[in-house]
Amino acid sequence: MPTYEYRCTQCQHQFEVFQSIRDEPVRTCPRCGGQVRRLIGGGNGLIFKGSGFYITDYRNKGRSGAKDDSGKGGGSSSSNESSD
């Protein structure tokens, strides 16, 4: 659901509302009760939250296979066995 920005025409209070596209627009200011207008925003684009963005989800999968292959050939199999 998108976040809409509004500004009061009386007190100039600016606020955001997280609402569905199907919801009616906000008509009154929560601070003074005056009339509000919805602002045109550029949008937030993509927001990446949490752990695991790119480096751990994509990059390491391709590289971990290469590391495992080089680790097996490098004689480090004994260290892999001891860590199990």
Image: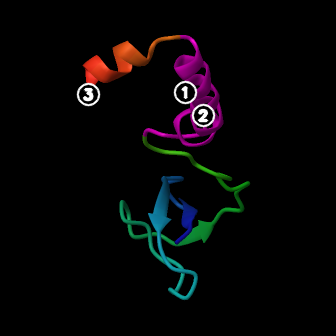
| Residue 9 position within the rendered picture, expressed as x and y whole percent measured from the top left | 58, 63
Lower position in the chain sequence, tag 1 or tag 3: 1
The type of residue carrying mark 2 is: Gly
As displayed, is residue 5 above or below residue 47? below
- Is label 2 in contact with label 3 (beta carbons under 8 Å)? no
Instruction: Name the residue at 46% across, 67% down.
Output: 18
Give, as a single range, the part of the protein colored magenta.
51-74
Badge 1 vs badge 2, beta-carbon distance below 8 Å: yes
Residue carrying label 3: 84
Q: Is residue 20 visible?
A: yes
Residue placed most toward the observer, 35 or 58:
58
Estimate how packed mark 1 is, as few (under 14), some (14 to 19) or many (20 or more) residues with alpha carbons within 10 Å: few
Q: CA distance from mark 1 to mark 2?
A: 5 Å
Q: Closest to the observer: 40 or 75?
A: 75
Q: Main secondary structure of the magenta part?
A: helix
Mark 2 or 3 closer to N-term? 2
Mark 3 surroundings: few (<14), some (14-19) or many (≥20) residues within 10 A: few
Q: Nearer the viewer, residue 27 or 19?
A: 19
Q: What residue is disc 2 on?
A: 65
For the residues marked 2 and 3, what is the alpha-carbon distance in whole angstroms? 18 Å
Q: Residue at x 48, y 40 (%)?
A: 52
Q: Is residue 8 visible?
A: no
User: Residue 68: which numbered mark, if any?
Assistant: 1
The residue under the point 62% across, 41% down is: 58
